[in-house]
């Protein structure tokens, strides 16, 4: 068993992992519900354009 030196401690690291939840991004914040609604509207719009005229 290794002895611990009370005067010196090793720093804790994240092993190079980035904590994305700490970073604030600039841009629109969309909920999953908004993404689903926009996708459905876009699909309906494409369907209407395809089969019109």
Image: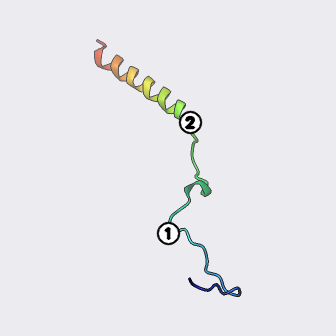
Q: Which residue is mark 1?
A: 16
Q: Is residue 35 left or right of residue 6?
A: left
Q: Is residue 38 above or below residue 9?
A: above
Q: Residue at x 52, y 34 (%)?
A: 32
- Nearest the viewer among 20 and 25 is 20
Query: Are circles 1 and 2 on residues that touch, CB within 8 Å?
Result: no
Q: Is residue 21 above or below residue 33?
A: below
- The quadrant of the rendering that contains the N terminus is bottom right
| Residue 21 horizontal/vertical position (percent) | 59, 54
Q: Residue at x 59, y 51 (%)?
A: 26
Q: Residue furthest right?
A: 7
Q: Is residue 14 left or right of residue 48?
A: right
Find residue 3 and name its label.
Answer: none
Neighbours of disc 1 within 10 Å: few (<14), some (14-19), many (20+): few
By what rule are the colours in the image chosen?
rainbow
Q: Secondary structure at mark 2?
A: loop
Q: Is residue 2 above or below residue 40?
A: below
Q: Residue at x 61, y 80 (%)?
A: 10
| Residue 19 horizontal/vertical position (percent) | 56, 59
Q: What is the CA distance from the residue labelled 1 to the residue labelled 2?
A: 29 Å
Q: Secondary structure at mark 1?
A: loop
| Residue 45 horizontal/vertical position (percent) | 39, 21
| Residue 6 horizontal/vertical position (percent) | 70, 85
Q: Residue at x 58, y 52 (%)?
A: 25
Q: Residue furthest top?
A: 53
Which numbered disc flags the more N-terminal residue, 1 or 2? Answer: 1
Neighbours of disc 2 within 10 Å: few (<14), some (14-19), many (20+): few
Q: Which residue is mark 2?
A: 31
Foreground: disc 1 or disc 2: 1
Q: Is residue 35 above or below residue 11?
A: above
- The quadrant of the rendering that contains the C terminus is top left
């Amino acid at each position: 068993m290794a002895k611990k030196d009370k005067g010196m401690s090793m720093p804790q690291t994240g092993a190079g992992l980035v904590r994305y939840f700490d970073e604030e991004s600039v841009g629109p914040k969309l909920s999953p519900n908004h993404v689903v609604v926009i996708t459905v509207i876009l699909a309906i719009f494409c369907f209407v354009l395809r089969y019109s005229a």
